[in-house]
Image (spheres, rainbow, N blue to C red):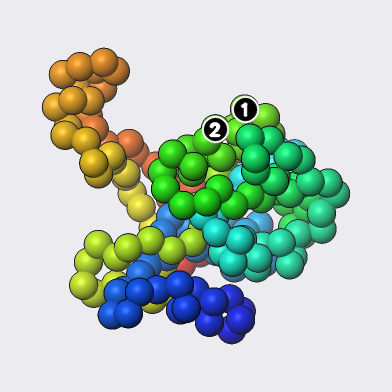
């Protein structure tokens, strides 16, 4: 919405570009992305209240559950069962909220919608970026591959079904 865009613009430091990350979805198009297991909820994770607001406007809320000082809004967006939360900024807060979406609400997938510092000069405010893989940005690769947890790679591939569907939607 225009109001949402204006709120995000106010949050951006002067001269700094931002980009949408993960899957930046209009709530009404979420059903086109999420064709997973019937009945399982979709998690919607945002860093701020302002980023979550457009989803809450279309969520037919059934209840709100408090866990770990977070409010999880449960309900329906169209025919999709959803659980929406804003975590606050930083990766630890996002990780806590994401783990709760998985453990407490058994979400089929998590859509991370919001803003982040742009990593490329060609990205502009409200661009959509669809990740094909992710990695820790603040840890040397060798720490993850040569020590516990002895990962084969520092990269995490995204779910192939979600990647294919998001490419179709945003093509």
Quadrant including the C terminus: bottom left
Q: Nearer the viewer, residue 13 or 142?
A: 13
Q: Position of residue 16 (x, y in %)?
A: 30, 74
Marks 2 and 1 in Cβ contact (< 8 Å): yes
Mark 1 falls on what kind of element?
helix
Q: Position of residue 59 (x, y in %)?
A: 76, 59
Q: Position of residue 49 (x, y in %)?
A: 61, 61
Q: Is residue 90 above or below residue 168?
A: above
Quadrant assignment, res 152: top left
Residue at horizontal 37 percent and vertical 68 percent from the top: 19
Q: Is residue 132 above or below residue 116?
A: above
**Residue indicated by mark 1:** 103
Q: Nearer the viewer, residue 134 or 54?
A: 54
Quadrant including the N terminus: bottom right
Q: Residues within 10 Å of mark 1 (few under 14, many from 20)?
A: few
Q: Indicate left or right for 139 with 158 as reference.
A: left
Residue at horizontal 40 percent and vertical 73 percent from the top: 12
Q: Nearer the viewer, residue 165 or 72?
A: 72
Would you say residue 58 is visible in this rendering?
Answer: yes
**Residue indicated by mark 2:** 99
Instruction: Return the mark for residue 120.
Output: none
Residue at horizontal 73 percent and vertical 39 percent from the top: 66
Distance from disc 2 to disc 1, alpha carbons, whole Å, reads 6 Å
Mark 2 falls on what kind of element?
helix
Quadrant assignment, res 39: top right
Would you say residue 79 is visible in this rendering?
Answer: no
Q: Residues within 10 Å of mark 2 (few under 14, many from 20)?
A: few
């Amino acid at each position: 919405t225009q109001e949402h865009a204006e709120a995000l613009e106010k949050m951006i430091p002067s001269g700094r570009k931002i980009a949408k990350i993960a899957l930046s979805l209009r709530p009404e198009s979420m059903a086109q992305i999420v064709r997973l297991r019937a009945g399982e909820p979709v998690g919607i994770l945002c860093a701020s209240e302002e980023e979550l607001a457009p989803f809450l406007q279309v969520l037919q809320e059934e209840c709100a559950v408090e866990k770990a000082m977070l409010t999880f809004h449960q309900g329906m967006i169209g025919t999709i069962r959803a659980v929406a939360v804003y975590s606050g900024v930083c990766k630890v807060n996002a990780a806590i909220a994401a783990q709760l979406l998985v453990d407490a609400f058994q979400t089929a997938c998590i859509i991370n919608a919001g803003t982040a510092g742009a990593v490329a000069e060609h990205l502009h405010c409200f661009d959509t970026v669809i990740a094909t893989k992710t990695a820790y940005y603040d840890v040397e690769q060798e720490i993850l591959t040569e020590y516990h947890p002895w990962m084969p790679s520092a990269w995490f591939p995204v779910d192939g079904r979600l990647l294919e569907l998001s490419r179709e939607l945003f093509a």
